[in-house]
Image (spheres, coloured by chain):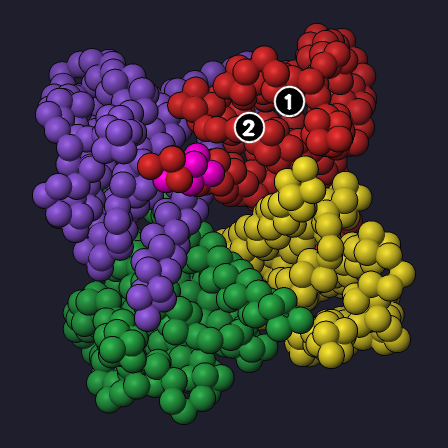
Chain colours: A yellow, B red, C purple, D green
Amino acid sequence: MVNLQAQDRVMGKGRMEGFSDGVMAIVITIMVLELKVPHGADLDALRPLLPSFLSYILSFVYIGIYWNNHHHLIHAAKKVSGGMLWANLNFLFWLSLFPFATGWMGENHFEALPSAAYGFVLLMAAAAYYLLQRCIISASGPQSVLKRAIGKDWKGKLPPILYISAIILSFQANWVAQALYVSVALIWLIPDRRIERAIAAAGS
Amino acid sequence: MVNLQAQDRVMGKGRMEGFSDGVMAIVITIMVLELKVPHGADLDALRPLLPSFLSYILSFVYIGIYWNNHHHLIHAAKKVSGGMLWANLNFLFWLSLFPFATGWMGENHFEALPSAAYGFVLLMAAAAYYLLQRCIISASGPQSVLKRAIGKDWKGKLPPILYISAIILSFQANWVAQALYVSVALIWLIPDRRIERAIAAAGS
Amino acid sequence: MVNLQAQDRVMGKGRMEGFSDGVMAIVITIMVLELKVPHGADLDALRPLLPSFLSYILSFVYIGIYWNNHHHLIHAAKKVSGGMLWANLNFLFWLSLFPFATGWMGENHFEALPSAAYGFVLLMAAAAYYLLQRCIISASGPQSVLKRAIGKDWKGKLPPILYISAIILSFQANWVAQALYVSVALIWLIPDRRIERAIAAAGS
Amino acid sequence: MVNLQAQDRVMGKGRMEGFSDGVMAIVITIMVLELKVPHGADLDALRPLLPSFLSYILSFVYIGIYWNNHHHLIHAAKKVSGGMLWANLNFLFWLSLFPFATGWMGENHFEALPSAAYGFVLLMAAAAYYLLQRCIISASGPQSVLKRAIGKDWKGKLPPILYISAIILSFQANWVAQALYVSVALIWLIPDRRIERAIAAAGS
């Protein structure tokens, strides 16, 4: 039966990955439906869409970053526990709110409350990702590759601070909030190579 | 030819699982499109969305539960019969009505008829899941792991009673209906470990 | 290199199957978006949706049938040619028009032209499926399992005649057209076991 | 550890392919949502949709072509680098704008600016595809199969020139722009067999 159980774990991981990829592919694509096709055919009809378009790019990059890092994260997991499944669904829940938050912020040209709401969704997605990470580490034991990989996680600790600052600043100067959202995306744009390196180190 | 037939069965199961995962990933994600982006940018614009948002969370959890249990169910199947394919499609049909039922209940702030309709969709999805389970057990023979796993299925028998109660109570006190829908979700939130345990027992 | 080429063919087939499944899963699920959530919360608000709901069920069954048969069809293919890829995309194109045709027929309560248009989409999807089948047979050579499986294809020849009759009859008595659409679905509801049988026969 | 790392690369490639296929399947299918179901049930209600329908066919063929060629491209990649992941996401970003560009052009009956915007999206998608190709070649080294396969790439160099011409000509004679978009699709309709041939040559 050992063989069957090993296969069971691999399948579970593959299916969780497949389902998550499906949700992320759909989220990243249906966001474009919030870019409402204008009725006019001139530049005046296109201009009011600019904030929506910029929000769309920002969210596309964020989902891309999460997809990329999620890939490395799940790869580091040894087995799929019930807790991991729900931590993963919680993470996908917050990603699923991206089209709404992006559309609201874009349609209202980065006004205070929609900007803060967008920051809140980013913050919760980051918190959910962190929870999922903890879940995978605790399931893999204290010697896990992932734990060593993350180590002194300044890259994981900085974004929440920046998101909270952005949420507060949305009500004073909303362009600062936008600048912070873009900054966090730039910080994360470099894929999470720490995990790759730790795996390589464990192998040498 | 034995080899080919064995491969055939595995592929069929994998593809049925993949298609089901695809449909569930789409259902869970397009539900968010029923959260219509408000035109205003203040709290007054957001407030009427609260019931829709709560309905969305509830349905997200339900689809998550079904996805999770469906995974264990299909895993227990030995082969894919024509009946199983259609029992599975019937199950997906009722899941596909979640965005409609969720949107209608949310937009009408949990009024009587939409609440009852939501309960009806939950009831039919549960019945379809039960049918799919019977299909898999009958295809696997009386000694099936799944049959032993489910055994005295109080967890499967309670929800229909609660759904029917909720449908009736929708017209008297709709908050009781909501409370029942939330309760069933909480009952199911614990993944169906009975199957896992029975597999482990069969292996020892 | 023989090994790589063999793997290449398998991958191509798997990816074509995966892409087709993705499109079919999306088509079957986004059709529900044409069931517009009504604003009212009583039966009067729901009643005008009945034709849309019936159309939705019919189309759901049709996509289910096509998904099921497509599975057997691709399974019988030995390799993926460029022609097959395009025959498959042509088939998916006509399936992708189902949400539009279903929505139009449902919203207009089975009126003449929308009923005929629905029949036209069904007819073209059937023709595209037939073309894909020819493509796979011609790529597999005259001794192909699939060719023997299909043999005297009354089940493939009847639907086009019924669809064309239905399109013409839409303008005289649209309920006859609907009855014919339902009849063809019932004929196809039994999965295409001829292929399975021929494979089994080839193995004995 | 060599084994694990090899498996790692294969999984990464498979997942990147799966995610890309998911996005392309969703893009090709949600485009149909821009074909708004008309309220009337006669030919007069359908006629204004003709340009939208023609745009839909054109975009469907384009996504089909990209899906087909992307398949061969990724297949030629030896490993997945961080740069490749982002080059691929950039490519998917431009594909994700197809529903918007298609809908805008169709709804405005091929007017100047929407036609030019459609050409711009086509141009950027082609540029993104080219970048992805360069990325894969540079990761595979100067002796890569892909590099030899592409060689004197007249088929890759012609479309950008035609797209830019079409964008400019949109403002003088928009039917010429449409004719050019259709022409490029016809050029590409033949799948990229150069890669297949080079792989075969490398094997002999």
Q: Element type at marker 1?
A: helix
Q: Is residue B141 above or below residue C119?
A: above
- Which residue shows up at 41% across the image and 91% down it? D142
Residue A152 included in the magenta stretch of the image = no
* Chain holding disc 1: B
Q: Please state which of residues B109 and C142 is positioned toward the viewer in this rendering.
A: C142
Q: Say which label, 2 or 1, has the lower sequence index.
A: 2
* Magenta-colored segment: predominant secondary structure: helix
**Which percent across, then down, holds residue D116?**
32, 73
- Which residue shows up at 67% across the image and 46% down it? A6
Q: Quadrant of the C terminus of chain B?
A: top right
| Residue stretch rendered in magenta on the structure | B4-10
- Which residue shows up at 67% across the image and 54% down it? A95
Q: Please state which of residues C26 and A142 is positioned toward the viewer in this rendering.
A: A142
Q: Quadrant of the N terminus of chain B?
A: top left
* Proximity of marks 2 and 1: CB atoms separated by less than 8 Å: yes
**Which percent across, then down, holds residue B158?**
75, 13
Q: Where on the picture, by quarter, is residue D192?
A: bottom left
Residue pushed farthest bottom?
D142
> Residue B146: which disc?
1
Amino acid type of the residue tagged 1 in the rendering: Leu
**Which percent across, then down, holds residue D181?**
23, 70
**Which percent across, then down, holds residue C52?**
40, 25
Q: CA distance from mark 2 to mark 1?
A: 8 Å
